[in-house]
Image (cartoon, coloured by chain):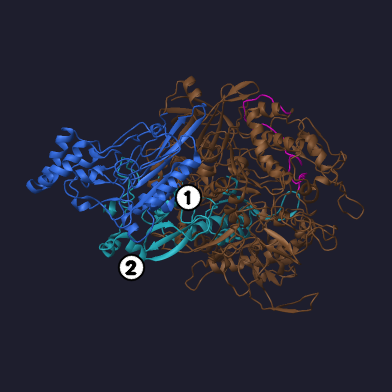
Chain colours: A brown, B blue, C cyan
Amino acid sequence: MTNHYIDLKNSDCILIMGSNAAENHPIAFKWILRAKDRGAKIIHVDPRYTRTSARCDYHVPLRSGTDIAFLGGMIKHIIDNNMIQEEYVKYYTNASQIVNPDFSFKDGLFSGYNAEKRSYKKDTWTTMKDEAGIPIRDYTLQDPHCVYQMLKKHYDRYTLDMVSSITGVSKEDLLLVYNEYGATGAKDKAGTECYALGWTHHTVGSQNIRAMSIIQLLLGNMGVCGGGINALRGEPNVQGSTDHAILYNILPGYLKMPSGPVDTLAKYIEKYTPKSTDPQSVNWYQNYPKYTVSFLKAIWGDKATAENEFGYSWLPKLDDGKHYSILHTYDAMYAGKIKGFFAYGSNVAVSSPNSTKVRRSLEKLKWMVNVNIFDNETASFWKAPGVDSNAIDTEVFLLPAAASMEKEGSQSNSGRLVQWRYKAANPPGDAWADGDITMKLMDTLRELYKKEGGAFPEQILNLKWDYRDASGKFDALKVSKQINGHYTQDVTIIDPVTGAKEENKKGETVPTFAKLMADGSTSSGNWVMAGSFDQKGLNKMAKRGKEDPTGLGLYPEWAFAWPLNRRIIYNRASCDLEGKPYNPNMKLLEWVGDKWVGDVPDGPAPPMANKEKGKMPFIMKVDGVGAIFGPGMVEGPFPEHYEPLEGPLAKNLMSGQSLNPAVTPFKSDLDKVANADSKYPFVCTTYSATEHWCSGFTRWQPWLLEMMPEAYLEIGEKLAKSLGIKNGETIKVASIRGELKCVAMVTKRLVPFQIDGKTVHEVGMPFNYGWRFPEDATDASANYLTPSIGCPNTFCPEYKAFMVNVSKA
Amino acid sequence: MKKELVKLIDLSRCTACRGCQVACKQWNELPAKRTRNLGSYQNPPDLQWNTWTLIRFQEHEKKDGKVNWLFRKDGCMHCTDAACIKVCPTGALYHTEFGSVSMHADKCIGCKACITACPFSVPKYDPETNKIAKCDLCYTRLQVNQPPACVLSCPTGALQIGAKDAMIKKAYARAAELGGDANVYGDKFVNGTHVVYVLPERADVYDHLPVDPKVPLEMIIWKDVLKPAALLTAGAVVAGCFLHYITHGPKTPDDETTCEGGNKS
Amino acid sequence: MKISRRRFLSMSGAIGSGVALSSLGLDLTALKAHAAELNKTDQVRMARQSTTICCYCSVGCSLICSTDKMTGKIFNIEGDPDHPINEGSLCAKGAGLFGMTEVNQHRLRKVLYRAPKSNKWEEKDWDWSLKRIARLVKDTRDKDFITHNEKGELVNRVESIAHYGTSNINNEECWTLSVACRAMGLINIDHQARV
């Protein structure tokens, strides 16, 4: 989230699209209804009428996988009706920059496409710079090659008729939403967007979000109270687990994971440190070397020295251009290339797409370690229905873990609020906290390497690994301080202006990432978390101050929000060029005299009107402004509508490209596809229920299981009637990849769509169920149906749109 | 009465997250039972001895043909003229100082008279303990000025508790704000209940919600005339059976109520 | 209304026979004896209270756990009214957090091991299990470790071990896992952020 949960109350219009907030983030709805109490309009755009829809002003059903068409139509409507926040668009976005004249877009493809590789060469996806390296701008936004005009041209094709025909949303409903939401382009109005997995789980997942980001920039809704792009993340610490990079492509703090060609630290820093000559750009990532070296110091400790490039060579490296997401991992596992698998706190046999492929892959492992608090379909895959355990050679370990209330540590919510939790009891039996499991496992492994040597033992033995308390247990506070960072030696800083001397002692925690250095004098496991402790070691994540001086719900003394306790990021964009808030009733920030007052600002520099020292508000962007033209994406700088891998249409109504051109489908015999196939005529989507969590460790909790006891398919009354299906009866659901039996829930809440003049039905089912528990359950994991394919930027699988058939069992 | 309280249920704010349904079980240590999906989110299908509050799910088609998913938190209404108390032969059910209806479990003899008497079908029988079970508005929490577990858990303000007058005033203000068919339910019958709804739709739209709940006349006769005598002359068990027989004949109320779930329109 | 603590959280309906409910059953006798004369509000007031952050969605609601000082067991968990986001409220999952504590008979309490071709779990102790896992990791890593890729670039990695992690552990655990994976030379590293 760029903003935070409480801030939802400050909005004038909340678009819930790609999210079922009332069901999956019920407490968020507390704040959404407070906005409604203030008169805000709440809009739910979703294929299904859900518990969220029930409390919104409008529910607008759209066909799964057509969000970009819907949003593209909104971009066109906003531009055509001049609903933009003009000053914001001119000065705080790249709308005024001039696009490379060689950049083009034709029939669904941007310039630079390589059909064989299904990827783009991005050399024309650039904006023009003058001789000094500063972007050329046309603040009138009239130049036909300026981003704004290019945007207008790109979305000119997204007419109401076209969008309605693709999405199934009536033109009246389109206009209703476009006008309500577009009205937040007024300077003193804020609109916000709540999305979740409903947007990410598509082959165009990242571009769904990009499309909305463009709208938010056009309407001046980024960086303001009640605005922003708000990912309501699905898991309790998915923010933290991403921040700390349990991911192949990044290191903690969103540093890039190095690849083969970048074989020295110098090359790495050169490649990833952005440069700007624009005096008004902060270009915060110019500090990249400081964060990199501080991270290397944190992982390798004293072993990391300037002489050995701070241990850069000990890091494993990726192959350039190759991906190692879980989808790729299963593909490799299915091909027999993976021997050992750690499945920590997860149940991939239920949660990953194309369950058949996943389960067949697990059978090929030599060993697997599953850490969990309950048994699950992954740990017990070798005794699943229809599996011959005698034919499976995998050694399986199921390690009992502590539950969240049985251990101490911090957790980061979607609003980047990092809060401390305490241990209330010991875990039962032999169960251990995950921290202890990792600690002890590495201890054992390191012992082996010390004793026996082996392949490149430096990598394992140079790891700094002393995070224990006096009793030998995992010490969360110690790790937390290591993440925050500290001075590795005495450091004296002399202020260049005042000459004041600041003495910092070795071992003191760094109070801000602004103090991190690239010379090895500081260590920080994750620079975004620097500042979670003060210099005396006070743990800010445990703070429980209830003051709210702005009245905007920022609660600056409650826990710690990264970065630097900033509650709303890009908050300087809430003020005009002079530093006065666009909405005087919600003073998130204001330039008063010579400083910012309010939230922790994005840097102390004056507002842009100060030609000498003023800075642009989007400090993390190299050009200082919000990106309407976004060349960082793999499938194009402007989001374009493509159909899901599987859909009801033989041809994309928008262009000759059906599937996202940058997606490469997997080719195994279990990766079957049935697009526009009469055998699988119904659109299907999957989701979670309020009463369950992900792959279903909630199934083991009787109170929750009692409310949602077994798998079901939601099916509209009309479709059910035509198939002769009655409410509550057992039915069969099949995709080309798999089938299952579950209960039919016949409902008025799902209505058919009119797509390209034809009636298209959509059904949906939760993915929380599996055979292992309850014991009398059927093997009704929804992911038997889903395809192994994902967004080419993030590889989030396409769980939300695929094709099935439904029949009486 | 020392401090009459009303729990206000504003259904226009309910998201059916069912925090209340579980918070009730957590606090009151009520077990779960194996259920089946009967084609509805509503589960268990009805109030049970182990489920004192339940969110009912009901799909309702509005006049304009649009779907409206109604959620209603069901549970004890804590009547002022409480049929259950009137009919209880042993004094197990009683009014607390807050106006709520609580129960001395040790006095309950499992006669089930209250089950047939209650106009809201709230008390449920637990065959294992041979006792009645129902919501007591978290009496021990009220005693230490803590909200009932359901009210504490409610994210959206659909559940509130406070002084009777203030809550009823609030209910009317909210109904007026909502307009249309919105109305207040609970203050007008059985001499007022201590649970009051703001209903966005007319009462007759909601499943299992009596439009005009009454204490049956025979209950009043029983309480005022027969019960004192019966308690004096016969053993309590006999009295309970007798009452049940004279009011309803030789019928046993179901302790495992089933229904087809909440998808009826 | 006091119900038998033994029935608490057990499912009384037909549930199949598989999991050994009795062997994983509750033993709350100590708590029961101590608490017999007190009602629950009194028990809560006398308990050690600590806050925790909910382990389900990402709103970050706070809850108060009440732990019996004599037994060290949690007996009540409810919303934290002081928390600025949830203000004491909880959804169904949060309100049921107590159902995930030790009272849940299904919690794993032992390391379980399944040998090749076996059709059953065996209980093992930590020492044996950690040694066995470390041995498997080392053998796999030593065999498959590559210092250079096909292009001859220095990569120092092992491709035949994968890690799929969780987003339901503390930050400190995330970070240690993240760096441990790198120190083992893993590159197939992923977690629930994508699902």
Across and down, in percent, residue A512 comes to 67, 68
Label number found at residue A16: none
Across and down, in percent, residue A745 comes to 45, 31
Which residue is rendered at x = 9% and y = 47% of the image? Answer: B235
> Is A778 displayed left or right of A186 in the figure?
left
Range of magenta residues: A627-654
Q: Are marks 2 and 1 on the same chain?
A: no
> Is A778 displayed left or right of B119 in the figure?
right
Disc 2/disc 1 C-alpha distance (Å): 33 Å
* Residue A405 figure quarter: bottom left
**In the displayed structure, would residue A397 be above or below residue A199?**
below
The residue nearer to you, when weighing A210 against A592, is A592
The C terminus of chain A: image quadrant = top left
Residue A645 seen in the current view = no
**10 Å neighbourhood of mark 2: few (<14), some, or many (≥20)?**
few
Does the segment drawn in magenta span residue A628? Answer: yes
**In the displayed structure, would residue B92 be above or below residue A760?**
below
Which residue is the site of mark 1?
B155
User: Element under label 2?
Assistant: loop
Q: Amino acid at mark 1?
A: Pro
The residue nearer to you, when weighing A428 against B240, is B240
Q: Main secondary structure of the magenta part?
A: loop
Q: Chain of mark 1?
A: B
Residue A106 seen in the current view = yes
Which residue is the site of mark 2?
C70
